[in-house]
Amino acid sequence: MPTAPNIPPSVRDEVVKLLYADADHVDWERLPAQAKTAQYNRWAEDPHIGGLLARFIPNPHLWIKEVPLKEYARALENMGRFAQFTVLHYSPPSDFIGPAFGRDWRYIPGSQADKPPHCLATDGRTNRYICWGSPNHLKDLLWASLTVGVREQGCPGVALSVRTDAEIDASDKRRHQAIGERCGIEVKYVIRPLRRRP
């Protein structure tokens, strides 16, 4: 199912553009599970989305859920095969590495990758691994820092990424930073606005 070779690329691209425009509009990343289920159903029943896909695949609902919407968070990070179809994207790591981890630290161009989103940063002497994501994914980010981040000399970092309008709970922030300290990982909260593509 994930490759769906029967969908012509032009149809796939048009459908993904429509899906992502809707996902941006409904603020997909913040929708509760029940609202996401209802939205999947609307897309599957939409003649321009599910109706069009049904001409090529037997289960448009499953394809919508397992292919483009599974890639949506990556696309917002400007990564993955569908990144070009999002209207919105998050600020890049070059914007938050220095302000969050100290102005001596700079993003190393070309080092950004995903699963989880991460990059390398340097202070000119030492490189360090920095990954980022939602505070809800702290456990996965810490694990990535412990297992992958140890390959670099510098202390790994985790940037807990929140939107401009997010309310940051001070006790959660202290607890997350204390957990990071116990693991030998620098944990910072980073405000990352969603921007419209130029």
Image (cartoon, rainbow, N blue to C red):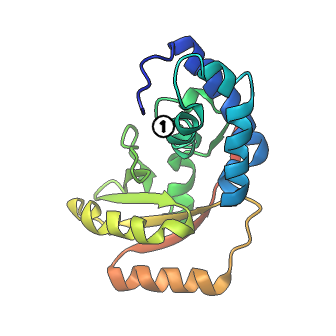
Q: Is residue 91 left or right of residue 138?
A: right
Place of residue 21 in the rendered image (x, y in percent of width and height, measured from the top left)? 72, 33
Place of residue 18 in the rendered image (x, y in percent of width and height, measured from the top left)? 70, 27
The residue depicted at 48 percent of the width and 37 percent of the height is 79
169 above or below 31? Answer: below
Circle 1 SS class: loop
Q: From where the camera sits, is residue 197 visible?
A: no
Residue tagged 1: 79
Q: Residue furthest left?
A: 151
Residue 169: name its quadrant.
bottom right
73 above or below 130? Answer: above
Identified by mark 1, the residue type is Met
In this view of the protein, which residue sits in the foreground, 130 or 125?
A: 130
The residue depicted at 33 percent of the width and 63 percent of the height is 144
The residue depicted at 50 percent of the width and 17 percent of the height is 7
Residue 92: name its quadrant.
top right
Place of residue 108 in the rendered image (x, y in percent of width and height, measured from the top left)? 38, 45
Residue 4: name its quadrant.
top left
Place of residue 99 in the rendered image (x, y in percent of width and height, measured from the top left)? 57, 61
The quarter of the picture where the C terminus appears is top right
The residue depicted at 34 percent of the width and 58 percent of the height is 129
The quarter of the picture where the N terminus appears is top left
Q: From where the camera sits, is residue 132 visible?
A: yes
